[in-house]
Image (cartoon, rainbow, N blue to C red):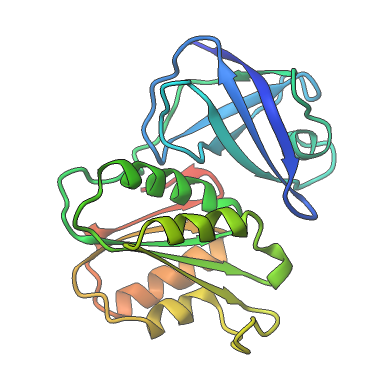
Amino acid sequence: MNRWHAEVLTHERRGRDVAVFTCRPGQPLPYRAGQHVTIECAYRPWQSRAYAMANAPRPDRVLEFHVRAAVPAGVSDALVTRLKPGDLLRLSPPRGDLTLDRYSRRDVVFVAGGTGLAPAKAMIDELTRCNRTRWIHLFRGERYRRDFYDREHVDRLALRHPWLTVVRATSEEPDEAGDQAPIADVVTRHGPWPDHDFYVFGSPPMVESTLRRLDRLGVPGDRVRYDIFGTCLR
């Protein structure tokens, strides 16, 4: 099986347990926004884990990843706490079919929790290059306000592209507007959604809750695609 070696270019801590880093493979790695690769690093030899690219393909081959540290001594923990520019990573071929429907003209709703922002951001990046008619809605859900990493970059995207709206919700404390609700409730509140494509990324409880709400709203199942913790299920 082919493997790509990629050099780490930048590494930034964007929260208590989140890092955003970029790397560049020595050879082109063909993929579509929404797909993922497995990553191996020297700090955890013979271990790997899947991560979605957080940007659409670029001419300079640079890839962006968002990683949240999980269990100590795991791959994610090493990528957050030990990785540095100049390190080499080994990437698998891209996998997954959770990509934008290029033939759809429906408006799009992304629902993202945690580092589920990464594939949503990659798809939005793709849409910035080709979108002419579709309204895009990004709903981000976190437990606490401090968990909204990369907030400034997302807000800049929304300022640059009038077709993109961003809504945030916190489930464990009031947000800036004094609201407190799971993201599934907020998505329901902003409905109905009679003719939209949905992409849902996040933890199992968040994804399952959102899917139940969309079903009750009558959103057809073939317009809803989802990813739980980097494992493409549909």
Residue 160 on image: x %, y %? 42, 56
Q: Is residue 65 above or below residue 215?
A: above
Kindly identify the residue that appears in the image at 25 percent across and 63 percent down: 221
Q: Is residue 102 above or below residue 148?
A: above
Residue 218 on image: x %, y %? 24, 77
Residue 200 on image: x %, y %? 42, 59
Residue 64 image-quadrant placement: top right
**91 and 150: which is toward the camera:** 150
Kindly identify the residue that appears in the image at 50 percent across and 60 percent down: 112
Residue 138 image-quadrant placement: bottom left
Kindly identify the residue that appears in the image at 81 percent across and 23 percent down: 43
Q: Is residue 224 above or below residue 102?
A: below
Kindly identify the residue that appears in the image at 67 percent across and 85 percent down: 174
Residue 154 on image: x %, y %? 53, 56
**130 and 214: which is toward the camera:** 130
Tally of marks: 0
Q: Is residue 203 left or right of residue 105?
A: right
**56 and 193: which is toward the camera:** 56
Q: Residue furthest front?
A: 160
Q: Residue furthest bottom?
A: 178
Residue 75 image-quadrant placement: top right
**231 and 174: which is toward the camera:** 174
Q: Is residue 80 above or below residue 29?
A: below
